[in-house]
Every structure is written in structure tokens, then in C-alpha cells.
Amino acid sequence: MLRIAIPNKGTLSAPASQMLKDAGYRQRTDPKDLVCRDEANNVEFFYLRPRDIATYVGSGDLDLGITGRDLLVDSGVPATELLDLNFGGATFRWAAPAGTLTSVDQIGGKRIATAYPGVVGSYLAEHELKADVVRLDGAVENAVRLGVADLIADVVETGATLRQAGLVTLGEPLMRSSAILIGRRIEPPAGATQLLRRLHGVLVARSFVMLAYDVRADLLDQATALTPGIESPTVSPLHREGWVAVQAMVQRSQVHKVMDELYELGARAILVTDIANCRL
């Protein structure tokens, strides 16, 4: 039976469980449950602290896990990213008092406060920089004001908290994180192929919609140039002479633009339908 770790709380917990439900897997009904067995799919889910998931997967005690890229890097364990799940995004940035530093190259020899010493240490090693990393569990923005550090490295959303602390961001982000599926090796363990295929199907379904419309046959080439689909659009003759019905998958982010262009071309009865899941 495949053993998979899921965040038991925090911002990744509910989206991770929902994605697995959308992929056809059973999930716990009581938030206090620590284990959920899905006999039909031969999978057992363990609900753990997000920071601990990489450790369990890296040790080989669990086969796979859903956690943040930042937490995986911070752990330093021998586990690897198998699939970006495209939720739980976070941006890690450097921040220092205005006017003190102008470039990330200047952080060498400085004191850096962070709740993610592994992430910072990895960046420093990759860029051959040396600095003192001060680990804090929270309220990192106050570290400079209190004299603990010269700059900080933390998750930045709007930057409002930084500004209140008199800090400004410095250089490019040191990491962009999101929820990921991790395993101990690049090659997924036995039984994981179905899980990966299903999760990929959910990702595609969330990125695309099904677009259906009617168009004159003499405009079909122009219309299908706007909606080429994945392999090819589906075209069916209509009872109305000289007209056809077309169906094609379209990127969700582009659907309104495509609908406008189809309407201007002469297409009518343009309908959009959500895709729950797919296999391509």
C-alpha cells in the first residue's frame, strides 16, 4: 500500500486534500483523524505537520508527501520534487533597512535573520556567499530593529509588514515556493504512477475549459485556428445547412479573449464548461 503524507493544518492542508479528492482519492472526514486508508486505491494517507513531511519521506518511512518547496529545501533531507501542484505560492525575499544595502552581493559577512535557515543556507552556498544566519521562529521583521540582524529573509506578500518595520526588499527573490509532491528518489516508488497521472489530470483540468460553439462551415478554418485544442478540435455537422458545431479545450486564462474573437468572426452559441478531470 502506498503511504503518503499530507499537511494536517496550515495553508496547504485544505487545498492538498481537495486536490486528492478531485483526483478520486478518499480523504478524512474528521480533521482530528491522523490516518485515512483508501482501500479502493491501495493508498494510506498520514496527516502530519507540514515541516515534518519532508523528513518522513526523506527517511523512507513514507513513500510520498505533499509539502512546500521551501519546507523541502529547508529540511535538507534526501527527497526530491516530483510534481509542482500549482497552489500555496510564496515568494521569499531579502529585506534590509532603506539605504543600507543596494545589492544582494553585499550580504556577505552580514547577520541574516530568518525562519528558514535551510533555504537561506542553500542560497548562500549556491552563490558562494558567507554570512551569519540567525534562526527565528516568527516576527522576523523585528530582528533588525532589535539589533539581532542586519537584514532578513522571509516570505513577502504585499510588503506592508516590511514597510512598517522600516525595511525594503533587496534584489530578486531568493526562492519562489509552491506546494509540491515529493519522493525520496527522482523515480517515483511502485504504485505512484496512477497518483501522478491523476494529479496531472487535475492540474490540466484546472488550467483548461471546454469551449463549444457553432460556426459557418466556410469559417471553420479561421475558427479552429483560434481553438486548435489539444490534439485537434471536434467538429460535427449541424442540422442547419452550412453550419458545424465545434468543441475544443482552451486555456482558462485565454477563454474570454477567444470567445470575443469567435463572436466577431461569426460564431454563435458559444458555451464554456468546466473540466473536472482529464487524461491526455
Image (cartoon, grey):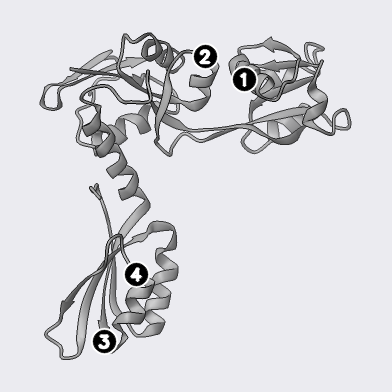
Q: CA distance from mark 4 to mark 2?
A: 45 Å
1 and 2 marks in contact (CB < 8 Å): yes
Q: What number is the disc on residue 216?
A: 3
Judge whether 279 appears above or below 73 on screen.
below
254, 195: nearer the viewer: 195
The three-letter amino acid code for the residue at tag 2 is Gly
Label 4, on which residue?
Answer: 227
Residue 10, position as x, y percentages in the image: 44, 23
Select label 1 or label 3 by which is in front.
Answer: 1
Residue at x 74%, y 36% (from the top left corner): 171
Relative horizontal placement of residue 33, taking residue 251 as reference (left or right): left
Question: Dot 4, how many residues are within 10 Å of its Cα: few (below 14), some (14-19), or many (20+)?
Answer: many
Give me the C-alpha separation between circle 4 and circle 3. 15 Å
For label 3, the SS is strand
State left or right for residue 176 relative to residue 201.
Answer: right
How many residues crowd around disc 3 within 10 Å: few (fewer than 14), some, or many (20 or more)? some
Badge 1 or badge 3: first in the primary sequence: 1
Q: Which residue is found at the position 51% from the left and 14% from the top?
A: 75
Residue that carries the numbered disc 1 in the rendered image? 122
Mark 4 or mark 1: whose residue is earlier in sequence? 1
Pointer 2 local density, CA inside 10 Å: few below 14, some 14–19, many at least 20: some
Mark nearer the N terminus (3 vs 2): 2
* Labelled disc at residue 76: 2
Query: Please, what is the three-letter code of the amino acid marked with disc 4?
Result: Thr
> Would residue 6 be seen by someone viewing this image from the given angle?
yes
* Cβ atoms at labels 1 and 3 below 8 Å apart: no
Q: Does 51 appear above or below 216?
A: above
